Amino acid sequence: TEIYTLSLHDALPICFVAADAESVDLPPESFDIVWVVECNEHFFDKRAFIQHVANWLRPGGRTAICVWQAGDDPLDDNARRLIDSVCKDFHFPSLGNSEDYRHWLTDAGLEVDRYCNWTDRVTKTWEISVQEAERSRLLWLTRALVRSELPFWDRNQTMLSAYQTGAMNYGFWVASKPV
């Protein structure tokens, strides 16, 4: 575990922790804010991680969580195949949906202050990634010589398709710990 502290002028110090989030042992009620960006997808026990976040927050503290989510149920077979493909290609054990995250947050004792579906804000990134990959000479060389590396290139299209069809969405959550 590495802890980095930054203090600006008379402001309170800002502490950044770089550690394995699933196993790090941090003191309870040690943070006013816990900011989690695109890492929940990698956790085997997402519910347990959300519980850790709640434990790390001081009363009145807040968390902001940006997460790749499965689309909301009911999902058709094609949507489930896209999610399975994204999980396989990006090495995710699973994806929760917005209902899962709402339950995990509230079950951990947090109050959901805000939820935003930011899919429309992130889809453009995947469109650009696909366009750049298609223009890349390296992609054409890879297709010709090293077929085993194609999932690296093709997963961008899978992710884009998942966002465009609603099989996935991008969630932004803000929750607070009651005082």
Image (cartoon, rainbow, N blue to C red):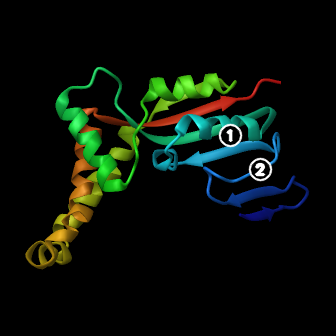
Residue at the (61%, 41%) spot, across then down: 49
Identity of the residue furthest to the top in this view: 74
Q: Which residue is mark 1?
A: 52
Q: Is residue 18 left or right of residue 133?
A: right
- Which kind of residue does numbered mark 1 sit on? His
Image location (x, y in percent) of residue 168: 33, 36
* Residue on which disc 2 sits: 26
- Amino acid bearing label 2: Leu
Foreground of the two, 130 or 179: 179
Percent across and percent down for residue 18 are 66, 61
Residue 112 appears in view: no
Question: Pointer 1: residues within 10 angstroms few (<14), some, or many (20+)?
Answer: some
Quarter of the image for residue 137 reads bottom left
Label 2 crowd bin: few (<14), some (14–19), many (20+), radius 10 Å: some
Q: Are marks 1 and 2 in contact (CB under 8 Å)?
A: yes
Label 1 to label 2: alpha-carbon separation: 9 Å
